[in-house]
Image (tube, grey):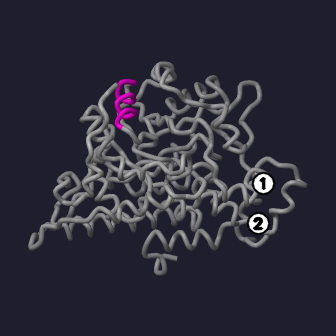
Amino acid sequence: MVPRVINIGDLREQARRRLPKVVFDYLDGGAEGEVTLRENCRAFEEVTFRPRHAVAVGACNLGVRILGHELSLPAMLAPVGYSRLMHPGGEAAAARAAGVAGTGYILSTISGHRLEDVKAASTGPVWYQLYLIGGREAAEGALDRARRSGFSALVVTIDTPVGGMRERDHRNGMKELLSGSAFAKLPFLPQILLRPEWLAAFLLDGGLPKLENVVIPGQGPMELIDVTAALARAVVTWEDFQWLRQAWPGPVVVKGVLTGEDARRAVDAGAAAVVVSNHGGRQLDGVSASLRALPEVVAAVNGQAEVLLDGGIRRGSDIVKAICLGARAVLIGRAYAYGLAAAGQAGVARALEILRADVERTLSLLGCPSVAELNRSYVDVPDAWLRPAPARI
């Protein structure tokens, strides 16, 4: 695989060839017209570099400190739901690859491997991302397990009062395949039969996994469900953060921040970090690209919390641009999930290897010796991106 895979786009193509259309489109697609999905990537093209030439930088230092953890690369693996559908190794394989690469992994609530097994697989920091599906009692059980297993931070996603309208999933029958009757599944089976290698691995893995980290008292792990219906019953509000700080003793990260107003509310709620994110273009279509929203959020946080970014990262140069605009580091989702879908742990490792080499090469070409020394002087940014954040009301 490796000689033919030189960038993340190559991993995407390998994933497309291996997965049934319904699973690939779940990973690859966005909401409605996918405007924000496209803009997340295109926004990086609007930021250009200002290099320092005739500078010998030697070996570049890519290390960064995030919530007290030293990472060898300024990129962590974002939570990706249904990872076990993409490859039987799923979340455990991704966490293991992250640890080997010297970086961190964030486990989604919508996961098929037990959180204890995921944490044990990684030698790096592992965070838990929370949805309230199953209610507070189920969430408290998961948080207690995560704490005892050594998860070091809690990530709370705030942009999912309902699931986005992901049109590809509707056309492909994602809901029917996950939770429909046998008769409802029939029209969608041909796309699965066209991928016999994936189907064999899926069946050997036991078929549809349960949500091992959403344990309903008296019932056991929740069945794999249509996430859109589940999210509509699991809204997270700012009022929930008082309860969350009592249920979770460690740092809390707020994911899904796109405005200065929400950034300040997150800080007021006790967030140790915020993630500038539009859910990879999978929720409200037509919102700002994450990179465009980054300067406003950085200004609003004003150093009171760490700022991370996700959305649209496909190259190491994208990571460098985000850091120049104020992010401490980035989260990558699709970029590693394509690798997971293509080749399990080896594919995730290849994705991280590609991005690491990209970042190091970009720093050398910029004439910058370390990630820590990146700043806005290394980039040109459209003036409209730097407008002042609205005043606090």
- Report the amino acid beneath label 2: Ile
The front one of 88 and 52 is: 52
Q: Secondary structure of the magenta portion, mostly?
A: helix
CB atoms at circles 1 and 2 under 8 Å apart?
A: yes
43 displayed left or right of 94 = left
The CA distance from mark 1 to mark 2 is 10 Å
Task: Reply above or below: 366 against 221.
Answer: below
Q: Position of residue 347 (x, y in %)?
A: 52, 66
The residue at the far bottom in this view is: 3
Q: Where is residue 65 in the image (x, y as percent from the top left)?
A: 28, 44
Identify the element where label 1 is drawn.
Answer: helix
The residue at the far right in this view is: 183
Residue at the image point whose x is 59% and y is 59% from the top? 29
What residue is pinned by disc 1? 177
Q: Position of residue 201 (x, y in %)?
A: 71, 63
For label 2, the crowd category at 10 Å Cα-Cα, with few meaning under 14, some 14 to 19 and many 20 or more, is some
Residue at the image point whose x is 55% and y is 55% from the top? 93
Q: Earlier in the sequence, mark 1 or mark 2?
A: 1
Task: Reply above or below: 110 against 135.
Answer: below
Q: Give the range drawn in magenta.
A: 260-269
What residue is pinned by disc 2? 192
Residue at the image point whose x is 52% and y is 27% from the top? 237
Q: Magenta stretch: residue 140 in it?
A: no
Q: Where is residue 325 in the image (x, y as percent from the top left)?
A: 26, 51
The front one of 119 and 23 is: 23
For label 1, the crowd category at 10 Å Cα-Cα, with few meaning under 14, some 14 to 19 and many 20 or more, is many
The residue at the far left in this view is: 54
